[in-house]
Amino acid sequence: MAVIGIMSAMHEELSAVLAAMPDEQVVHVAGREFGVGQWHGHDVVAVLSRIGKVAAATTATALIERFKVDALVFTGAAGGLAPDAQVGDVVVASALLQHDMDASPLFPKHEVPLYGRSRFDTDTSLSKALAAAAEQVLSDPAQHLGAQAMADFHLLLPRVHQGLIVSGDRFVSTTAESQALQRSLPEALAVEMEGAAVAQVCLDYGVPFAAVRTISDRADDDAHIDFSRFIREVASRYSLAILSQWLMHR
Ligand code: ADE
């Protein structure tokens, strides 16, 4: 049976995934705890990605080399860049790019040297299935979220977007930086700190990859406000529901 690797960026999210895998065994590799078990009848290995591109790349490599995953899905939160990527929306990546990669003038800005590309595509059918699961979950947010969180975060009509996610080793929390990113990468929907690195590892190994992120902030001067509460009360609940919905119908 295919083994599915799940990398979660958030503790709360990973705990909820592990709670859904009651017989899971914990295996330690590279200082990380990998939860090996079954969820909705699928062999699953779930692990905290850790934060930043290098840490996430190491985690992805261990999932592939040691646990032989056949597909890898990353879930977590991201800052919204595109004007319509609002807090509470979900972005399913069609491609990822490292916004802080710049080996110019030797290579074009954002191109990863020796790969001949800046964009790393996700797996089309995996992303399509996860987007369908996200649409299903977001069609009735009240089923997954508390009424107070929905009111406080104004989550009335959340949307699912598909497109470019950009990654870099910085939490983007100023309006100036967010605007600079939007100017240099106008197609980017959202920014986070791991996805493009994991996409590169998956390309190296030929492992299908998908990434699903809930927009937790607008990557601007207010980006830190209520971040932890949003992760706890919204993003981790969406991730769990989306993964569960996807695996149930896979
Ligand atoms: N993850 C969630 N919000 C983010 C932001 N504003 N910048 C980088 N990573 C994020």
Image (tube, rainbow, N blue to C red):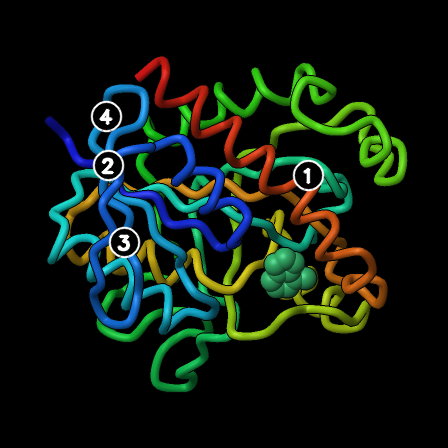
The spot of residue 241 in percent (x, y) is: 53, 27
The spot of residue 77 in percent (x, y) is: 59, 50
Q: Nearer the viewer, mark 3 or mark 1?
A: 3
Which residue is label 3 attached to? Answer: 34
* Residue displayed at 17% across by 36% down: 3
* Residue displayed at 70% across by 41% down: 233
Which residue is label 4 attached to? Answer: 42
Report crowding for label 1: few under 14, some 14 to 19, many 20 or more residues within 10 A (C-alpha). Answer: many
Task: Check disc 1 and report its element: helix, strand or loop.
Answer: helix
The residue carrying mark 4 has its beta carbon less than 8 Å from ligand 1: no
Q: Amino acid at mark 1?
A: Val
Task: Check disc 3 and report its element: helix, strand or loop.
Answer: strand
> Which numbered dot is residue 94?
none
Pointers 1 and 4 in contact (C-beta within 8 Å): no
Q: Amino acid at mark 2?
A: Gly
The spot of residue 149 in percent (x, y) is: 81, 36
**Earlier along the polypeptide chain: callout 1 or callout 2?**
2
Q: Against 203, is 100 above or below? A: below
Pointers 2 and 3 in contact (C-beta within 8 Å): no
Report crowding for label 2: few under 14, some 14 to 19, many 20 or more residues within 10 A (C-alpha). Answer: many
Task: Check disc 4 and report its element: helix, strand or loop.
Answer: strand
Which residue is label 2 attached to? Answer: 37
Q: Is residue 138 left or right of residue 41?
A: right
Q: Is residue 17 left or right of residue 164?
A: left
Q: CA distance from mark 4 to mark 2?
A: 8 Å
Which residue is label 1 attached to? Answer: 234
Q: Is residue 98 left or right of residue 145?
A: left
Q: Nearer the viewer, mark 1 or mark 2?
A: 2
Quadrant housing residue 186: bottom right
The residue carrying mark 2 has its beta carbon less than 8 Å from ligand 1: no
